Amino acid sequence: MRLKRLQSMLDKVDALILFKPENIFYFSRFFPNSFMYLLIPRDNTPIAVVPQLEFEEAKNTITGFRVLQAKKQKDFEKILSKLQKELKIRRLGFEDDSLTVNVKEKLEKNLGEIRFIPASTVVKKLRAVKSSDEIETIRKAARIAAKGIEKAIETANPGVREFEVAAEAEYTMRKMGSSGVSFETIVASGRRSAFPHASCGDRKLESGDLVIIDLGARYKNYCSDISRTITVGSPTSKQKRLFQTVLNAQKKAIEIITPGVKASDIDRAARGLIKKEGYGDFFVHSLGHGVGIEVHEYPPIGPDNKDSIKAGMVFTAEPGVYIPGFGGCRIEDMVLVLENGCELLTNAPRSLV
Ligand SMILES: [Mn+2]
């Protein structure tokens, strides 16, 4: 289905070549662990070229493709130039956002007279609108992350180290069937909470700390992403005001999410409120990003993206305010865009204590 849709969109190229594992998985349902590629002609059966190491598994997983085996590294090139002649490929779409210089040079050397056409955008936009199967898998990944963050919050007490909080959350997610994290778990406490990407250190939590916890689970090759901010012990009035502002900003953004709204308008809804409260200089990132096979994918939800959102998209809403020397606050949830409005996929309590 998604293959047919892709082929019908290939109007400027004779074929598309895909090397990026996430794109290969999207079209073939096979997630490669080593170098391989898919060649998708506009009007012919697509081909997967797989190393010997993964051939048996690929052959059993991939349907609707010719699955060819590359026994040696050189075979990848030989097979491709054979296919080029056989299928008369003169214009080849490639992943301009991820193809390495090394592979591109090899392609140019081996394929001779051929035009390379940037084609990442087509694939990105296809992947952004999720199928019902994908939504079910992402839903589960989101549920696991919500349980993970609840465990982290429960663990975050005075004297406990940041990495211990991360360990408890990750153990909980693993036991629920997660194959791993979708990015390195962030537990940033005290002044470190003012660094948006502080990951996780060995600092012991102290009473009075703000703590940002940001994590995600990987489940059946799909990702989730959630953040909460808490205080250790009772919050000060300044901490409360910061938290309430970020929470209100998130609500304001989520309220307007429905098909047809521009991504930049969703960002502005949150950013405007944060500015009004005087924290405008401290919201230093976009409001959110798409989530799927990758934890950061299309669409970006930021001031520069004027594209309209569509039903079936899944992305985060994560306003954050980071005050150097004081601390930070970020609240992040995943939303699914419905035909009318949106649905929260990550359900974990949002409260400072
Ligand atoms: Mn995120």
Image: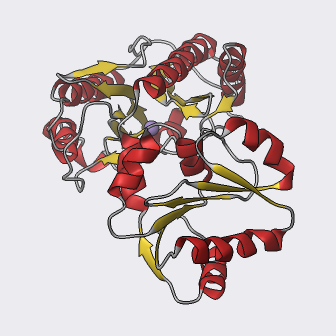
Report x, y in % for residue 56. 82, 42
Residue drawn 59% across the image and 56% down it: 20
Q: Nearer the viewer, residue 281 or 264?
A: 264
Which quarter of the rendered picture does the N terminus lie within? top left
Residue drawn 54% across the image and 50% down it: 23
In the rendered view, tell whether residue 274 sits above or below residue 121: above
Report x, y in % for residue 311. 25, 31
In the rendered view, tell whether residue 227 sits above or below residue 321: above
Compared across the picture, whether 138 is left or right of 104 comes to left
Residue drawn 47% across the image and 28% down it: 134
> Which quadrant of the figure shows ligand 1?
top left
Which quarter of the rendered picture does the C terminus lie within? top left
Compared across the picture, whether 254 is left or right of 113 comes to left
Q: Nearer the viewer, residue 198 or 158?
A: 198
Dividing the picture into quadrants, the one containing residue 291 is top left
Report x, y in % for residue 5. 37, 46
Q: Nearer the viewer, residue 255 or 242?
A: 255
Looking at the rendered structure, the number of numbered marks drawn on it comes to 0
Chosen colour scheme: secondary structure
Residue 323 seen from this side = no
Compared across the picture, whether 87 is left or right of 6 comes to right
Q: Nearer the viewer, residue 231 or 291?
A: 291
Report x, y in % for residue 334. 39, 27
Residue 254 seen from this side = yes
